[in-house]
């Protein structure tokens, strides 16, 4: 009986974790709207993207911070040692100046975790397959 209860609890916990992961995936369509509204003035994505007021964000996941050749990064960003992952991007989007003190990015941060996940889902669509 005790083993059955433990198994049931483990299955319930496992099911809950899977549903939380599915929710955390984000909505790329909502992320596109958000990107266009709050990021697109400085950043570009897509086949013709290039650095302008901010760096282009194609293939950002796995890329070292401050490494594209078509943008002049701050010394702070170039020497940050960051690799852009979901975790580092989330932290940076939430509080850029805390993650990279001295960054030139003029953005106050985004505290809504669902919006951050949506934005990351959209950026993920620009990763090479």
Image (cartoon, helix red, strand yellow):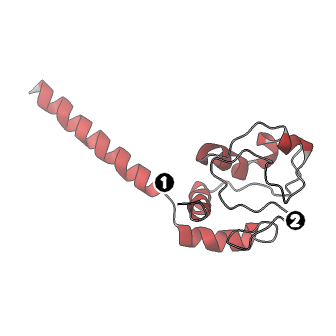
Q: Quadrant of residue 70?
A: bottom right
Q: Quadrant of residue 124?
A: bottom right
Q: Position of residue 105 (x, y in %)?
A: 85, 55
- Residue hosting label 2: 53
Question: Mark 2 or mark 1: which comes first in sequence?
Answer: 1
Q: Position of residue 8 (x, y in %)?
A: 19, 37
Give the mark toward the camera: 2 or 1.
Answer: 2
Judge the density around disc 1: few (<14), some (14-19), many (≥20) Cα neighbours within 10 Å: some
Q: Nearer the viewer, residue 10 or 64?
A: 64
Please name the residue shown 41% across and 50% down the image.
Answer: 20
Q: Is residue 13 left or right of residue 62?
A: left
Q: Nearer the viewer, residue 92 or 56?
A: 56
Residue 54 makes an appearance in the image: yes
> At numbered mark 2, what does the secondary structure look like: helix, strand or loop?
loop
Q: Position of residue 120 (x, y in %)?
A: 60, 58
Q: Nearer the viewer, residue 101 or 68?
A: 68
> At numbered mark 1, what does the secondary structure look like: helix, strand or loop?
helix
Q: Quadrant of the N terminus?
A: top left
Residue 67, label in figure: none
Inter-mark Cα distance, 2 to 1: 30 Å
- Residue hosting label 1: 24
Please name the residue shown 36% across and 52% down the image.
Answer: 19
Residues at marks 2 and 1 touching, judged by CB atoms closer than 8 Å:
no
In the rendered image, the vertical position of residue 93 relative to residue 51, given as above or below: above
Please name the residue shown 82% across and 45% down the image.
Answer: 97
Q: Quadrant of residue 101?
A: top right
Please name the residue shown 55% across and 73% down the image.
Answer: 29
Judge the density around disc 2: few (<14), some (14-19), many (≥20) Cα neighbours within 10 Å: some
Q: Is residue 46 left or right of residue 14?
A: right
Q: Is residue 43 left or right of residue 87?
A: right
Residue 101 makes an appearance in the image: no
């Amino acid at each position: 009986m005790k083993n059955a209860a433990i198994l049931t609890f483990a299955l319930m916990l496992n099911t809950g974790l899977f549903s939380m992961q599915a929710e955390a995936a984000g909505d790329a369509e909502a992320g596109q709207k958000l990107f266009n509204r709050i990021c697109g003035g400085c950043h570009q994505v897509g086949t013709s993207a290039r650095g302008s007021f901010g760096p282009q964000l194609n293939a950002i996941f796995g890329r070292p911070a401050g490494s594209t050749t078509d943008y002049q990064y701050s010394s702070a960003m170039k020497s940050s040692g960051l690799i852009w992952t979901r975790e580092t991007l989330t932290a940076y989007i939430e509080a850029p100046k805390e993650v990279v003190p001295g960054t030139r990015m003029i953005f106050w941060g985004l505290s809504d975790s669902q919006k951050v996940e949506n934005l990351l889902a959209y950026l993920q669509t620009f990763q090479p397959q």
